[in-house]
């Protein structure tokens, strides 16, 4: 089963864009981009606005990958908390990474959504819910740390009763709410980015799966019906590269995550969520959920380790949803779909030059809604010789998976199964 066989709620909620033509023939441009998601489209937009000749090659449709199919949550910071980043990258780089994440939020909310008028149902508020009592003190201490050491005062600690007022589940013992985070419609954001990039002069080809990259002084991309040679190639596919660039696939592994939406619930939505904030919990195999603008519950839960989706996704998601909200046992799921994201061994993004003129940004490990657009802008800067921020990201510790591509899947299954067991204990 392919992704397009399981239409998402977002596809039903957004008017479809007209198909774009596939690549036919040979082109010569300044920058060629692989992947029409958050990163690739943002890179194309900023490059085109800087006067570069840019093409984007998308193997299916704009927003077909994780960018158009995810939970739509906008988190603060990087994928790892600042305490961990200070240990992994050093205090100075950790602070620079925090500043980058805050810039990513401003770019998303003020430049793309605000100034450019991309209507993607932005809604503030993101709750962190702890499913184990021992986690609550750590969550509250981290909120204090962000306020005292990083000047970020948007995270409000919640005790069990305060959390229950917002999330009507007995599964949680406390947590926090980040008033600076929130949620949005990711497909609407992708569509808006594509229109902005094309308006700036970038060309997007759909149905243009890259089959091979030829490295060299002027790298070249080959599709079934054409090729593109460029001064620089940007790989922006996250977890969907599939055999094109081994140097990336050794560090970025695909995981399929599954999401469903209920039918519109009306007043019954209050039985689960009493605010408009999104929720992400403390499980390693995370549950995430939120209300939609038309009064549904959107719930994400359950992972598989293949780029091929199960035939019927709703039965995968339903048990996870009912574990949190058993009171919704009689509620119908109307949409169920999945998407593939890229993860790395350290959950830090893989941003590198894999050869002198081929750059990559991938492996967001679930943080791509906020980070992807800024990282696309940073790739665009690197194409023009501005390397400070690219070099900062390149220093992040992202080793390859042990055993390379061949052991990725069994290793992921073993690790994720272990942590799923820990979640239940």
Image (cartoon, rainbow, N blue to C red):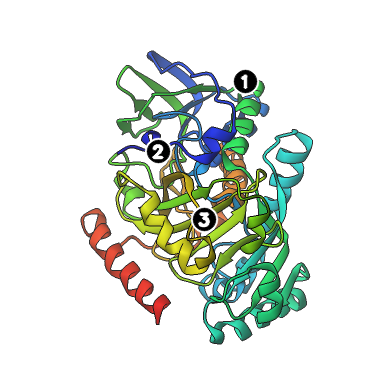
Within 10 Å of the Cα at label 2, are there few (<14), some (14-19), or many (20+) other Cα atoms?
some
Residue 365 shows in the view: no
Secondary structure, mark 1, is: loop
Looking at this view, name the residue that lies furthest to the left: 406
In the image, residue 177 sits, relative to residue 357, either above or below, namely: below
Residue with the mark numbered 1: 201
Secondary structure, mark 3, is: strand
Question: Which residue is at 33% across, 49% downward?
Answer: 249
Which quadrant of the view contains residue 379? top right
Q: Marks 3 and 2, Cα distance to the nearest angstrom?
A: 16 Å
Residue 266 on image: x %, y %: 66, 50
Question: Which residue is at 54% across, 41% downward?
Answer: 39
Question: Which residue is at 48% across, 49% downward?
Answer: 332
In the image, residue 132 sits, relative to residue 295, either above or below, namely: below
Q: Marks 1 and 2, Cα distance to the nearest angstrom?
A: 32 Å
Residue 401 shows in the view: yes
Specify the quadrant that holds the N terminus.
top left
Q: Nearer the viewer, residue 207 or 293?
A: 293
Residue 368 on image: x %, y %: 54, 50
Task: Tell me the mark number nearer the camera, choosing from 1 and 2.
Answer: 2
Secondary structure, mark 2, is: loop
Within 10 Å of the Cα at label 1, are there few (<14), some (14-19), or many (20+) other Cα atoms?
some
Residue 309 on image: x %, y %: 32, 45
Within 10 Å of the Cα at label 3, are there few (<14), some (14-19), or many (20+) other Cα atoms?
many
Residue with the mark numbered 3: 299
The answer to which of marks 3 and 2 sits earlier in the sequence is: 2
Question: Which residue is at 42% across, 76% downward?
Answer: 423
Residue with the mark numbered 2: 6
Question: Seen in the image, is 366 located left or right of residue 74?
Answer: left
Q: Which mark is residue 322?
A: none
């Amino acid at each position: 089963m392919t992704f397009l066989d399981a239409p998402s709620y977002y596809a039903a909620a957004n008017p479809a864009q007209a198909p774009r033509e596939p690549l036919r023939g040979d082109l010569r441009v300044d920058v060629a981009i692989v992947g029409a998601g958050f990163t690739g489209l943002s890179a194309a937009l900023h490059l085109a606005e800087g006067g570069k000749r840019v093409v984007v090659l998308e193997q299916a449709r704009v927003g077909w990958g994780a960018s158009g199919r995810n939970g739509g949550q906008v988190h603060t910071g990087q994928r790892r908390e600042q305490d961990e980043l200070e240990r992994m990258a050093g205090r100075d780089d950790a602070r620079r990474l925090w500043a980058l994440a805050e810039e990513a939020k401003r770019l998303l909310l003020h430049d793309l959504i605000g100034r450019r008028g991309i209507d993607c149902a932005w809604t503030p508020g993101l709750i962190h819910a702890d499913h184990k009592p021992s986690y609550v003190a750590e969550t509250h201490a981290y909120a204090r740390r962000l306020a005292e050491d990083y000047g970020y005062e948007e995270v409000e600690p919640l005790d069990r009763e305060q959390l229950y007022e917002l999330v009507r589940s007995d599964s949680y013992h406390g947590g926090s709410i980040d008033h600076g985070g929130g949620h949005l419609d990711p497909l609407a954001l992708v569509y808006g980015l594509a229109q902005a990039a094309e308006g700036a002069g970038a060309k997007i080809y759909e149905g243009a799966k890259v089959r091979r990259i030829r490295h060299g002084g002027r790298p070249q991309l080959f599709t079934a019906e054409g090729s593109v040679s460029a001064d620089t190639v940007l790989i922006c596919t996250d977890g969907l590269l599939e055999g094109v660039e081994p140097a990336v696939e050794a560090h970025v592994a695909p995981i399929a995550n599954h999401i469903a939406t209920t039918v519109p619930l009306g007043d019954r939505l209050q039985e689960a969520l009493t605010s408009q904030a999104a929720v992400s919990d403390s499980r390693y195999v995370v549950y995430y959920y939120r209300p939609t603008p038309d009064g549904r519950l959107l719930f994400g839960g359950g992972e598989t380790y293949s780029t091929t989706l199960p035939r019927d996704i709703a039965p995968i998601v339903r048990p996870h949803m009912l574990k949190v909200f058993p009171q919704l046992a009689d509620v119908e799921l109307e949409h169920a779909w999945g998407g593939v994201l890229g993860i790395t061994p350290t959950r830090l993004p893989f941003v590198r030059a894999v050869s002198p003129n081929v750059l990559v940004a991938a492996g967001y490990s679930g943080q791509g809604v906020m980070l992807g657009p800024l990282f696309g802008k940073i790739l665009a800067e690197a194409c023009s010789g501005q390397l400070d921020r690219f070099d900062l990201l390149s220093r992040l510790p992202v080793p390859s998976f042990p055993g390379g591509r061949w052991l990725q899947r069994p290793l992921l299954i073993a690790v994720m199964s272990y942590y799923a067991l820990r979640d239940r204990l």
